Amino acid sequence: MASCWGLPELLCEFPSLSNKSLRTMRTTIDGGFRDLVRSWSDVIDQATWPLQVFLNTLEDIFTQTPWFIVMAVMLGIVYAASRSWKTVLGAFAGLMFIGIFDLWEDTMTTLAMVTVATLIAIILGLPLGIMMARSDRFKSVLSPVLDVMQTMPSFVYLIPVVVIFGIGKVPGVIAVVIYAVPPMIRLTNLGIRLVDQEVIEAADAFGSDSRQKLWGVQLPLALPTIMTGVNQTIMMALAMVVVASMVGVGGLGKNVLQAINNQFFTIGFLNGFALVAIAIIFDRTSQAFGKRLQKHTETGHD
């Protein structure tokens, strides 16, 4: 009998299922999954229809509104959040770069998708983070799920999403949400757990119930940390744009993917730089807003 390192061959090769068994298992699972999706296809279409309408409406607003109006609104939001003319000037320069190189419409398409994905991630992540903070048992159950979501290669998300929802913008948004929601959940949980216990005890002394403590004490004090979660969610959504373009999502991600396939260095660089510009605008604005919230929380005035 052949051996390696003085051991029998049986001990040298890891025991595994036969090729026939693995093939049968894969065929059974894949076929059953596809049959299940087909049987629920009408329900899935009805459930995702509002998301499709919302995404298309927002995209139409961004792309069909004159560019100077969109830019003015965006710069107004940046100033309102950051109260910094330096940040506004940087945002203006980034948006001008995007427009000069004829990337405005694609950027607006990407911006619509990221906006929708971020809103969904916040709507899902905030209550889940609150539940994690209020229940150690729920945290122990959800934490491994978040670990898998954050470590799973992003391309893998596309397989079940495409099988269930098909090709299009909605599957892309869903894939982005799955990839981007974990930071929102984790940082909401962390922010609430980091609230000073003495403050909680003071609220108890005044007779506050759990709901009053949550909305009147814990969430306001945790808001800077929660805003960091929003910031990270936006960054991860932008990072997922190129991958999501593989399932039919347009915008800058599609251009980058085409540039990679055709080895167009200039096109890839310009579209990548547009993504970076949008990411920097979001990052600086949300960070400045988070710092203002923290200052307001600590001093009691803005």
Image (cartoon, grey):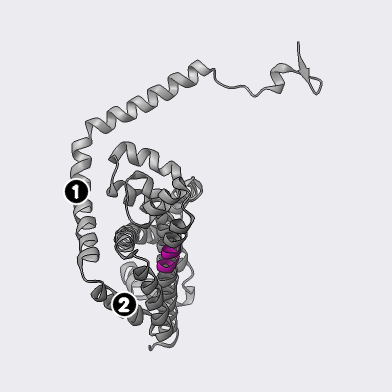
> What residue is drawn where x is 22% and y is 51%?
52
Residue at the spot 42% in from the left edge and 49% down from the top edge: 257
Q: Circle 1 sits on which residue?
A: 49
What crowding class fits label 2: few (fewer than 14 Cα within 10 Å), some (14-19), or many (20 or more)?
some
Give left or right: position of 221 versus 3: left
User: From this viewpoint, is residue 226 visible?
Assistant: no
Q: Hey, what amino acid is under mark 1?
A: Trp
Q: Secondary structure at mark 1?
A: helix
- The span shown in magenta is 273-279
Vertically, is 22 above or below 173?
Answer: above
Question: Is residue 219 magenta-colored?
Answer: no
Instruction: Please indicate whether residue 126 sits to the left or right of residue 236 in the image.
Output: left
Residue drawn 33% across and 30% down? 33
Q: Secondary structure at mark 2?
A: helix
Residue 237 drawn above or below residue 144: below
User: Quick one: quadrant of the C terminus?
Assistant: bottom left
Rendered location of residue 127, percent (x, y): 34, 60
Residue lying farthest top?
1
Q: Is residue 251 above or below residue 22?
A: below
Q: Quadrant of residue 199?
A: bottom left
Q: Which residue is mark 2?
A: 77
- Of 227 and 62, the residue lying toward us: 62
Answer yes or no: do the residues labelled 1 and 2 have beta carbons within 8 Å? no
The amino acid type, in three-letter code, at marker 2 is Ile
* Position of residue 21 measured from the top left corner of the image (x, y, whole percent): 49, 18
Whether residue 70 is situated above or below residue 13 in the rendered picture: below
Q: Quadrant of the N terminus?
A: top right
From mark 1 to mark 2, how far is it between C-alphas?
Answer: 29 Å
